[in-house]
Each structure stands twice: as structure tokens, then as C-alpha cells.
Image (cartoon, rainbow, N blue to C red):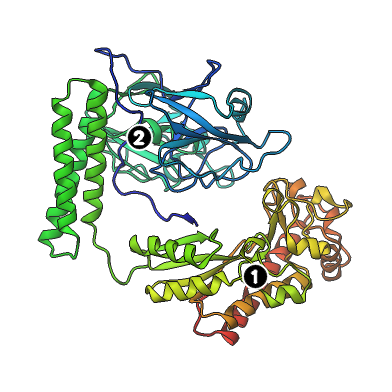
Amino acid sequence: MRTRRWGTALLGAAALTFPTAGPVHAAQEPASGPGVIAADGVRQEITAIDPPSRAAGVLALYTPAFQPTTGTNAFGAEAVLRRTAERDVYEVLDVCTALTSPACPNPGDNAIPADGAVLSASPGGSPDVRLFLRDHVRKGDRIRLDGMLFRSVSATLDAMNPTAAGNPGGVDPATGACFPGCRGAEQLLAYISSPTQGERTGTNANGFEVTVVDGRVTARGGGDSLIPPGGFVLSGHGSKGEWLSANAVLGASVTLDAGRVTVSVDAGTYARGAEQQIAAAEAGLAEAEGSCLPVDAEAAGRHLAEARDLLGRAGAEPDERAAAELAQRAGQAAVRAWYRTRESRPAEGRGLWVRPTETTAEQIEKSLDRIQSTGVNLIFLETLWQGYTIFPSEVAAKWGVEAQRPNMKGFDPLQVWIDGAHRRGIELHAWVHTFYAGHQSANGGPGPILTAHPEWAAVEREDVGKAGPQPSSQEAGYYFLDPAMPEPRQYVKEVFREILTRYRTDGLHLDYIRYPVSVPYQASFSYSDHSRAAFAREHDGADPYTLTMDDPRWTQWNAWRERQVTSFVSEVRALQREAAPETRL
């Protein structure tokens, strides 16, 4: 089972719980920053720790605190690590990159060992950070994680108290107005308390921010942070946000000097962070009890007692590393206590997107037990993905498409998921891929639908004239159906009808209800023979393949493509109302 998580933590989580403690020399100097040292001595900076998504060109470290797998795509590179008895040293269990030849099977979405971690490199960097894993890391190597506990790192600010005039990178070129907070892509900004600066940063949630008071990080979060009097907020987007998240832990020291920000993590950082987290949990518990909220006060108190005990032990520990790690554990216990003080409203939806990987009914029941234990009451189960249904489909068989995902043949996983979810009081919604038909890496080709019907493929502008389905250049390896073509539209609707009429799902959840990414111009979709002829019939013989973006008819071509998607959604809505009016869309 793979899950996609909703939302972000409301309280800054403690930093990594490893490496394990060991002897240290007094008064250690902070390391230059998190990194990994390969067996051949080459060091590579780690620029993100447990990021919710990888920015381009970063080397991220995913820890067991993240989720069962990294959730990354197949275009990067990953090395799976297991901790050894030697401090900071890890054994490489496996390594695979998208650059490896011959191809290896798992350059992304690897399981994170409970006693280890995964190094994950994304494409798009210069130099390409994936090359470090390809050229310097081998299965069986022993590598060292460096600078994970104590460190001092610096970065250049793009602007302080940004304005449209002073920070042109934060301005939307289409409108001439600032993006939210005047923060642009891949920018690192400082919002400093002043009479001319607003009370908040004004940014959106697509980044990461830390609040600094008296030179120390006091809060971590998403966007639009309150700027403290006499303090400031650091705000990063993309890889800059990941850099902040990885390094600016609660209690870290932060200085601004001549347009540069320096973040230092020392022995006292973790104790200060734990103190803040304990105080937040205590306040949350007092508020909940004073408001008579139905929270688990007993569990919150138990975790708080654990946090106080660990912090006390940290204060008495003479070894800096051991003290820091005890304080980390104290902070984590305080975070658990804080979460227990949050009211769980019976009416709210607590949902997960789930990609089912279970191949037996017993495995499904175990996964449902895990989901139920978290308080989730809404599952979006990936029912049609990469061209395969997880259930035995009579519709697919009728159209000559492989009738079920191969590793699930022999039983009906969808029925087991539905029955098990409903027994537990959990809603089960069928999550379906609409026009996305398959992935080159996952399917070993275009997938079962386009294997049976290659003429249904969406055609990228630069692929006109090529034989057979071609993957998207901007969503590498992804194959799509042509949304304008009647036959694939009919096929998909029949599969949806089959789900709605054969199964008691609580909803039908449409995904990939779109054309493939169609920028830049050369990568636009879809120039299939059908789409070109259909557009020409409606627009005085105009061939969209000959249009440029400067042609007045280009807007007509865009509007025509929009109508293909909108009309399909309307048809599915009519189908749902007719076939299963009690089911939500």
C-alpha cells in the first residue's frame, strides 16, 4: 500500500534521530552542512531532508519518519541505506538511477528501511546530482552521513522585505503584479519587522518558512507567517524552501549579514527546540481540557512526561552528541503529545489516496487495520491506474484490453477493499486515471490500453508522423489517450459505468482529467489525425498543426481542447447521475 498524505504538520517536527551517539571530542566545531561521503571519499551535499516533494537538482535524505516509501518518480536516482554499528556509517543495500545502463528497476519510490534511510537525487540540476549516486555509490559500499547533528550552513538572500521594484524575480510577468509575498520561484527571502513592512509575509503555501526571534528559530511552517516584532521570517520556495526545512530546525541560531543568512545547529539547539515543543504541548493540553474538548488527555500527558524526562536526562548528559540526541527524542515526544491535544471532529473527512499493492485479501485487511488505527475515514483507492483496472473488468475484455492488473488476478481486490472499509466505517471512493494510459518504466511500454489500441494515443506536436504511441516529453515516460477521440472516451466511460454499477463505492474520483503538459509550444498536445481533422471541420479547414502561438486561431485551438475535457466531465456527470445517483463524483 502506498499513501499520499494530506496537509503538513502544524508543529515543527524534531530533526533526525540518527546518527547514533558515541564518543566525541569536547567543543566540536559545527560541520559545514549535511552531506554524504562515498566510499571513494567524494562528498556530496544533502540539500533536503524528508521533503514532501523533491525540487529539481537536489539530493534528499528520506528517513523512516517520512512514510513507508519515498514516493518519488522514476526519473531520479536512489540508494537504500541500512545503519551499521559504526557511528554515522551506513551500508548501501541497493542503488539505481535513471541514468544507469542497462536500466535498473527502481530509480524511485523505494521503501525506507526502519533501520536506515534512502538517498534520493532528482533530475534537473547542473551538475546533475544523480551522477553522484551513479558514479560513486555501489551496492555493498559503506558510506558516511556527515554533518547531520551539528552544522553551520549559509545561503544568499534574494531580497529582504521584497517589493516589485526591488525584487523583479517576485513579479508575475503576465500581470506585472507581485506573486504572493513578492516571492518568486527558487527564491530565499527575509521579511524583517519594520514600520513599512506588513504584519505577515503574504506568501502562499507553496514554500517553507521559519520564524526567528532573538536570533533563534521559534516556529516552522508553510506560508503567510506572522512577522514577529523585533524579529524576522525566512521564506524559501522550491529547493530554497527545502534547504530551510532541512537546516533551520527549532532552536537553531540564525544570523543575517550583508545579504547572507547563516543557520547554525549546535549542542543547545535541540534542547531549545524541545523546550518550545514541550511548552506548545502543555498549552495545547491546558486549552483542550479547559474547553472540554474530546481529546486523548491521558496519552498527551504520558507523552509529555516522557518528553520532560528525556529533556532532563539531556541536561545532565556530559557528552554533547548524546545530549543532543536525547533532546531530539524529547522534542519528538512533545510533538506526539501536542497532536493528542487536537480535537478530532466526527464530521470531518480524514482521507488518504491509496495505491493498492496488496495481492491477497489478508494483506488488504492488514492495510485497512493500519488505516483505521490512524483515524482515517475516507479512502481514495487507485482503481484504474497506468491503464489497468485492479478488478476483473468485463469492459476491458470486451474491448480487447488486458482485463486486470496481472499481479492481482485470481481475486477481486476492489470488492475486498470496499467490504473491509465499510465494515470499519470508512468510505471507499474509486480513484481513477482518466486520460493517463500508462508509463514506459512501469508498464514496459505504453500500457495495456494503447497496446491494444495504439490509434487512441494523444500525439505531441514534435511526434507528428512517428509510428505508434509516443510518451510525453514534458512528463517523461507518460502516455495519454487523446481526449477528443470518441473511441477512448467511450471506453473510459464504460469502465466508469462498470465501477458505478458493479460496486458500492462511495464516490468516483477523477484524476488526470486533462491533456498532457503542453508547454513549451513544441511539446503541446494533441495533433492526432482525428483531432486535426475535427478542428479543421469546425474552423474553416484550419489545421492546428500549422498554427503558431501568434495566429489569432491559436486561442480557438486552446478553447477547442478545453471543450474536449469539459464535455467529457459533463458526460461522466450525466452517467453518474443515471447509473449511481447516490454516489459522489
Residue 194 visible within the image: no
> Crowding at label 2, few (<14), some or many (≥20) Cα neighbours within 10 Å?
many
Give the quadrant of residue 161: top left
> Crowding at label 1, few (<14), some or many (≥20) Cα neighbours within 10 Å?
few
Q: Residue at x 37, y 30 (%)?
A: 247
Element type at marker 1? helix
Q: Position of residue 45 (x, y in %)?
A: 49, 24
Task: Name the front one of labels 2 and 1.
Answer: 2
**Earlier-in-chain disc, 2 versus 1:** 2
Q: Which mark is residue 16?
A: 2
Q: Residue at x 12, y 59 (%)?
A: 289
Left or right relative to 520: residue 189: left
Q: Which mark is residue 566?
A: 1
Asked whether 461 or 117 is in front, the reply is 117
Give the quadrant of residue 503: bottom right
Q: Amino acid at mark 2?
A: Leu
Q: Is residue 410 above or below residue 74?
A: below
